[in-house]
Image (cartoon, rainbow, N blue to C red):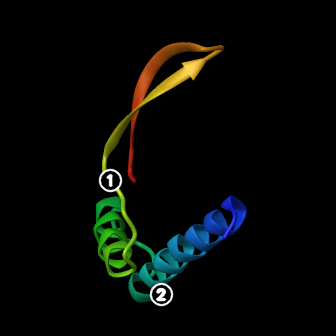
Amino acid sequence: MNKEQIHDDLTYKIIGCAMKVHTALGNGFQEIIYQRALAIEMTKANLNFVRECEMKIFYDNEEIGTRRVDF
């Protein structure tokens, strides 16, 4: 399996998990509820992930700050 196929498979699995959450919960909840549900689905799909990860932000190759990302 080449890199593109691996990424396509991973993307398919992630979107599938998100769609399951959306179908089950619909809209109107706080973001944290969707994060928790998505973590459950991603675990069931055997996907490795990290929640609330701090990432550096760069502009023109210079670090200008950080941002906490959901996954």
Q: CA distance from mark 1 to mark 2?
A: 23 Å
Q: Nearer the viewer, residue 4 or 45?
A: 4
Q: Amino acid at mark 1?
A: Val
Secondary structure of residue under mark 1: loop
Q: What is the crowding at mark 1: few (fewer than 14 residues within 10 Å), some, or many (at least 20)?
A: few
Is residue 59 found left or right of 14 in the rendered image?
right
Instruction: State the residue position of label 1.
Output: 50
Q: Position of residue 38 (x, y in %)?
A: 37, 71
Q: Nearer the viewer, residue 15 or 28?
A: 15
Q: Position of residue 11 (x, y in %)?
A: 59, 68
Q: How many marks?
A: 2
Q: Position of residue 17 (x, y in %)?
A: 46, 78
Q: Which mark is residue 23?
A: 2
Residue at image x 40%, y 69%?
Answer: 47
Secondary structure of residue under mark 2: helix
Please tell me in which quadrant of the rendered image residue 44 appears.
bottom left
Q: Of the residues under marks 1 and 2, which one precedes in the sequence?
A: 2
Q: Quadrant of the N terminus?
A: bottom right
Q: Nearer the viewer, residue 8 or 37?
A: 8
Q: Amino acid at mark 2?
A: Thr
Is residue 33 found left or right of 28 in the rendered image?
left
Residue at image x 42%, y 80%?
Answer: 21
